[in-house]
Structures are given as structure tokens and as C-alpha cells.
Amino acid sequence: MKESNLTSKEKAVSAGLIVMFSIISLIALFPVISLVVASLSPATDLMRFGLTAELFFTNFDIENFQTLFSAEAGSYWRWYGNSLIVSGVLIVLSLFFSSMVGYALALYEFKGKRIIFVLVLLILMIPFEILMLPLYTMMINLRLVDSYFGVMLPLIVAPIGVFFFRQYCLGLPKELMESGRVDGCTEFGIFARIMAPLMLPSFAAMAILMGLMSWNNFLWPLVVLRSSDMFTLPVGLATLLTPYGNNYELLFSGSVMAIIPIIILFLFFQRFFIAGLTSGGVKG
């Protein structure tokens, strides 16, 4: 009888959790659903009662996307391509350099190791807005303003990436490094051929996080880019709102298209995402 009551309680708790998480999921999805509905609604419907969020279609229309993809809408595909180039290169370079720095801080002993790690933590805690002015001056001196490298250079070695990889590498067996040295492997060979395959979950987790950060980055590209042809997608979409007229229908359509690469990135790496985050987060 007692076991039966316990089972009933467990079923009730499970049902309650399902209902609670379903409601939370609907609340989380509300902005996305509203954005999709707005992107497929005529411009006149969007502003009929002021700019409001709707969950259901009153009129279905794909004209917003047709206008967005036409030459008259500006350089949408150019902005899209710029974001793909900047984010793709930034993910690859950031994973490579951040993982090497984190790996060295975790598994090698050298003078100044603790000081470097403390500096990484300090930079991690300083808001990027405080660093923007000296970074912008540096970009001017290097003649990298209004260029891809100007957007990417300050973000190639991310402090959060270094910290994450360092925490993850603390759990890797040092005996494998000794085995590699005995077999005549170089230090870079030990990293690339022995340790890096063991770090795949951390690479996947950081690829998603770095992809999100670089794809959605708005402030730094806005500061360092000048010409419309060099704008990344967030900066380009912001130009659709001007003092002379707000193209909300194009902004919503462009924002829906901007979600697609992030979804693809997450689906590609999702198998390793949770494992990478939990493994990197529990080691001290």
C-alpha cells in the first residue's frame, strides 16, 4: 500500500514537472514564434495597432522575404556572408589558440603560470566596453579599421575559452604525455595527436558558445566597421531602423534568417555539448 502511494506521488511529481517545463518552454519560445509570425505578416498588419507581438497570423504573406532578398533592400546577403566569414574564422582560430593556452596552463609547470591565470580571470571579469577604447586605438595604429581582421583580432583568444579549456584539461591524464615523449612525439604532437582527441566535448561546447558570441556580436563590429559592404549581419540589420523610416517587416524577416546558422551549429555539436559543459565545469 505504501509502495503504491509512493508510486502515485512520483507520478504526480513527474506530471507536475512535465507541465511546469512545458509552460517554461512555451514562454521561452514565445519571442521566436512571435518573430516568425511578424516576418510573414504584411507590413500594414504589423503597425495597424502599433508594434505588438502576435502569436497567430491574420494574413499570411511572404512579400517581406521577397523584398529582403531583392537588390532594393540593400546588402543583406553581403552582410550575411560577412557574418559567416567572421564567425567561421573566429571559431576556428579561437578554439585553436584558446585550447593551447588552456592546455598549457593546466598541464605544464613554468614560471609565471599562476600570474597568467590570474590575469586571465581579471580580463574575464572586466566588461568589454571598458577595453573598447584602447582596442580601437590599437586597430587604428595597425590600420585594421573597417576590415575582417579588425573585427576578429581582439576576440581570437577569448578569456572564457582559456578558462574553460584549462578547467577541462585538469582532468586529462598526464601519463599520456609521458608516453608520448617516450615514443618520441614532440610537445605539439602530444597536444594535436593525443590530447586534442580527448578534448572533443570541450571543443564542441566552446564552438557553440563562441559561435553564439561572434554571430550575435553587435557593439565591437559597430565600432570598428565603417562601410556598408563590410557590415556584419547585426550591424546591417540595425541600419534598417533610421530616423527617416523604420523597416520593421524587413528587420523581422532578416532576424528569422539570422537564427538558421545558430540552429545548424547547435544541431551539429549538440551530441557533445552537455558532456563538454559539465566536464569543464566540475574540475577545479
Image (spheres, rainbow, N blue to C red):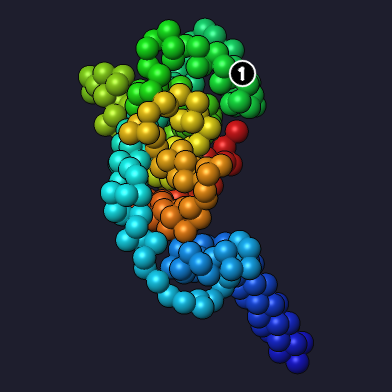
Q: On the image, which quarter does residue 123 sit in?
A: top right
Q: In this view, which residue lies farthest toward the front?
A: 244
Q: Is residue 51 visible?
A: yes
123 or 110, which is in the foreground? Answer: 123
Q: Amino acid at mark 1?
A: Val
189 with respect to 223 (left or right): left
In the rendered image, residue 28, in percent from the top left (x then y), is placed at: 60, 63
Mark 1, Cα crowd under 10 Å, few <14 / some 14-19 / many 20+, is few
Q: Is residue 277 visible?
A: no
- Residue 262 drawn above or below residue 118: below
Between residue 134 and residue 67, name the one nearer to us: 67
Percent position of residue 18, x then y: 62, 75
Instruction: Tell me: residue 60, above or below residue 93.
Output: below
How many marks overall? 1
On screen, residue 71 versus residue 212, left or right, reads left
Of the 4 image quadrants, the one containing the N terminus is bottom right
Q: Secondary structure at mark 1?
A: helix
Going 51% across and 78% down the picture, which residue do you hit? 58
Near-viewer residue (81 or 59): 59
Residue 49 against residue 85 in the figure, above or below: below
Indicate whether 50 appears above or below 150: below
Q: Which residue: 40% across, 19% down?
A: 145
When asked about the image quadrant of residue 186, the answer is top left
Image location (x, y in percent) of residue 98: 43, 27
Q: Residue at x 58, y 26 (%)?
A: 128
Identify the residue shown where x is 47% and y is 59%: 249
Residue that label 1 marks = 118
Q: Quadrant of residue 81?
A: top left
Q: Position of residue 255 (x, y in %)?
A: 45, 53
